[in-house]
């Protein structure tokens, strides 16, 4: 688990940010966000079962991910947190807010899955034989691209601003052949569980900011706008010139979004 900051500061308790990573990913994906937050918040970024330091545990779906997030807050002694969900982790954040609204002070949904998913491609990727073969090839190709020093040019301008050293660690932690099983479990959850998660959007009543990269092509077109429209009072921010990996390329924007929703939720007054 990646954690930066302490619970207490000179002025009192700092807001805690529970950061939920994507698929694939680990809690360390939020290192740049933690730096951008400086001493304003404490960031806790757990690895989900199946990833990083918990690669030996079986991966699971959104409901299990929400329960796991709850156990992290209990273990850390945190009553209410700002929940930052990235990509697939955004679905976990939404499920967590629906299941445990008393523990979620605010939401920041970064390049999150949302309305429009699962797409037709998502359904193909979830197939046990053909989908698994495609996913294996995709993970291998991404692994090769990120190992090259010129990966920015290979993967497009949307990766501009991402630390190359983090990209290479990401390869080692998240793109090994053994990660395929975890990826497939979560891909099937996107198809089988996520439509039910979306049905609960209208019932959410917490300060929410949806953040999307202008060049993001990994979530369904228009998903960020529709996600913001589906949650009462949600704000939408588009980050110019970046793609899907907002924790790296848009870390400062995410940090400011966290501070803003924490303030709206009454967790702090900077």
Image (cartoon, rainbow, N blue to C red):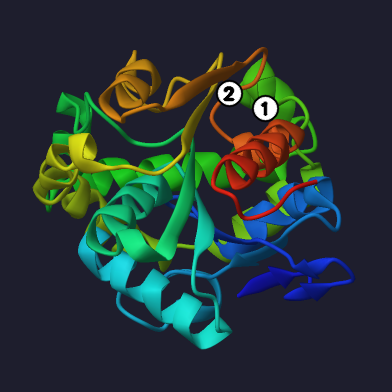
For the residue pair 80 and 194, the one nearer the viewer reads as 80
Q: Quadrant of the N terminus?
A: bottom right
Position of residue 106 relative to residue 70, above or below, is: above
For the residue pair 269 and 186, the one nearer the viewer reads as 269
Are the two marked residues, 1 and 2, in contact with CB atoms closer than 8 angstroms? yes
Quadrant of residue 67 in the image? bottom left
Asked if residue 49 can be seen in this view, the reply is no
Q: Farthest residue toward the right? A: 10
Judged left or right of residue 25, residue 42 is: right
Position of residue 172 relative to residue 82, above or below, is: below
- SS at circle 2: loop
| Residue of label 2 | 243
Query: Going 32% across and 29% down the picture, which residue do you hit?
Result: 232
Query: Going 30% across and 77% down the picture, which residue do you hit?
Result: 58
For the residue pair 187 and 77, the one nearer the viewer reads as 77
Query: Going 38% across and 74% down the picture, which residue do you hit?
Result: 70
For the residue pair 119 and 254, the one nearer the viewer reads as 254
Judged left or right of residue 84, residue 90 is: left
Q: Which mark is residue 159?
A: 1
């Amino acid at each position: 688990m990646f954690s930066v900051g302490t619970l207490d500061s000179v002025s009192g308790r700092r807001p805690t940010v529970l950061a939920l990573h994507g698929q694939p990913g680990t809690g360390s994906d939020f290192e740049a966000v933690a730096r951008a937050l400086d001493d304003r918040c404490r960031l806790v970024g757990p690895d989900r079962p199946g990833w990083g330091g918990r690669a030996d545990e079986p991966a699971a779906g959104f409901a299990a991910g929400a329960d796991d997030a709850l156990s992290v807050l209990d273990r850390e002694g945190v009553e209410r947190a700002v929940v930052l969900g990235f990509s697939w982790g955004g679905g976990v954040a939404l499920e967590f807010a629906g299941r445990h609204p008393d523990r979620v002070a605010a939401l920041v949904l970064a390049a999150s899955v949302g309305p429009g998913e699962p797409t037709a491609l998502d359904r193909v990727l979830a197939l046990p034989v053909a989908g698994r073969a495609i996913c294996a090839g995709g993970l291998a190709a991404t692994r090769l691209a990120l190992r090259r020093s010129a990966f920015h040019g290979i993967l497009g301008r949307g990766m501009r601003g991402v630390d190359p050293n983090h990209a290479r660690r990401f390869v080692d932690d998240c793109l090994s052949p053994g990660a395929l099983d975890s990826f497939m479990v979560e891909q099937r959850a996107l198809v089988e569980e996520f439509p039910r998660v979306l049905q609960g959007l209208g019932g959410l009543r917490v300060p929410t900011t949806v953040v999307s990269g202008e060049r993001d092509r990994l979530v369904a077109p228009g998903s960020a706008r529709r996600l913001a429209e589906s949650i009462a009072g949600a704000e939408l921010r588009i980050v110019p010139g970046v793609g899907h990996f907002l924790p790296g390329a848009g870390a400062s924007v995410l940090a400011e979004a966290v501070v803003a929703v924490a303030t709206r939720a009454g967790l702090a007054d900077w």
